[in-house]
Image (cartoon, coloured by chain):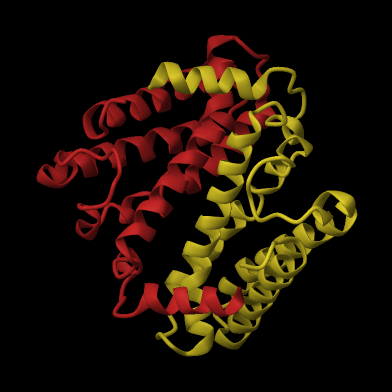
Chain colours: A yellow, B red
Amino acid sequence: MKRKLFAAGLALTLSAGAAGTAFAQAKPEVLVKQRQAAMTLQGKYFGPLGGMLKGAVPYDANVVARNAAFLEALSKMPWDGFAESTKGEKSRVLPVAWTDAAKFKQAQDQFQSAVTALVAASKSGDEAKVKAAIGDVGKNCGSCHDNFREKQ
Amino acid sequence: MKRKLFAAGLALTLSAGAAGTAFAQAKPEVLVKQRQAAMTLQGKYFGPLGGMLKGAVPYDANVVARNAAFLEALSKMPWDGFAESTKGEKSRVLPVAWTDAAKFKQAQDQFQSAVTALVAASKSGDEAKVKAAIGDVGKNCGSCHDNFREKQ
């Protein structure tokens, strides 16, 4: 396994000079798998917060703080996976993600800002503020999916 | 999408009192997908570090620091996905993960400690120390896979 990991590292980092482009050389199907993994985990850690916002489950400030911190890392992970090389891969991403790259980037940035605000709110001890921040993250998830993901 | 996320949140958090058990109620196939997603992303962010350790790609302290921070979050994410309810799901986990749960937990803890040490090393500016820490994380990946994952 270690050999496989190291080989993957080599493939991923060849011709990678800067952090932002470090994964541009990975195989398209690997990039898709990785970006979908980040979305899966965003769902894992946002899901319970959505439940709290709806009042369907008891509010738990510790879970919010932990999940918000996880989401802060996860919110940065999917985007380099939407490389041009992945256009032909099976996935639900809409072509507009590339034809209007600026709009897609803006949606990513807004989502990340909403998550950063949730992290800050989760440290405030103010439940109303936390719930507003959860709602804002959820809106960003939804609008980005509405604009850039195929309906099922 | 938002409705689906909220419904997932509800399913995930029903009867969840503590952070550690917050996801115990998720469907087994969802738990497997989520734990595999965490492993996929560990591979994404550890891979390039393995390449640096081998000298196959240039050492880049910024990439190390970023990836180490991501790995710190990711190193905490897979484990609640190995719930007893997932025993019947298709995956490569070996039965020993449940028959010797203490050993599995120890392997998880050692991996997390190795990642925490890598984060500390990445802040030291000491390349030799960083590379030793990368090697230690890699050893932990490998030994946990050797002991708890089916060979392919």
Position of B72 compared to A28: left or right?
Answer: left
Position of A43 compared to A114: left or right?
Answer: left
Q: Is residue A44 above or below residue A49?
A: above
Residue visible at 33% across and 55% down in the picture: B81
The answer, for residue B131, to whether it is visible in the render is no
Q: Nearer the viewer, residue A113 or B65?
A: A113
Residue B34 pos. (x, y %): 42, 54
Q: Nearer the viewer, residue B68 or A142?
A: A142
Residue visible at 50% across and 18% down in the picture: A6
Please, which residue is most extreme toward the left here?
B99
Residue visible at 25% across and 55% down in the picture: B86
Residue A11 pos. (x, y %): 61, 20
* Quarter that holds the C terminus of chain A: bottom right
Residue B142 pos. (x, y %): 34, 25
Q: Nearer the viewer, residue B107 or A9?
A: A9
Residue B116 pos. (x, y %): 44, 38
Please, which residue is most extreme toward the top here?
B55
* Quarter that holds the N terminus of chain A: top left
Q: Is residue A58 above or below residue A115?
A: below
Q: Is residue A120 above or below residue A91?
A: below
The answer, for residue A91, to whether it is visible in the render is yes
Q: How many marks?
A: 0
Residue visible at 66% across and 30% down in the picture: B63
Position of A33 compared to B80: left or right?
Answer: right
Q: Is residue A46 above or below residue B45?
A: below
Position of B81 compared to B68: left or right?
Answer: left
Q: Nearer the viewer, residue B79 or A43?
A: A43
Q: Quadrant of residue A114?
A: bottom right
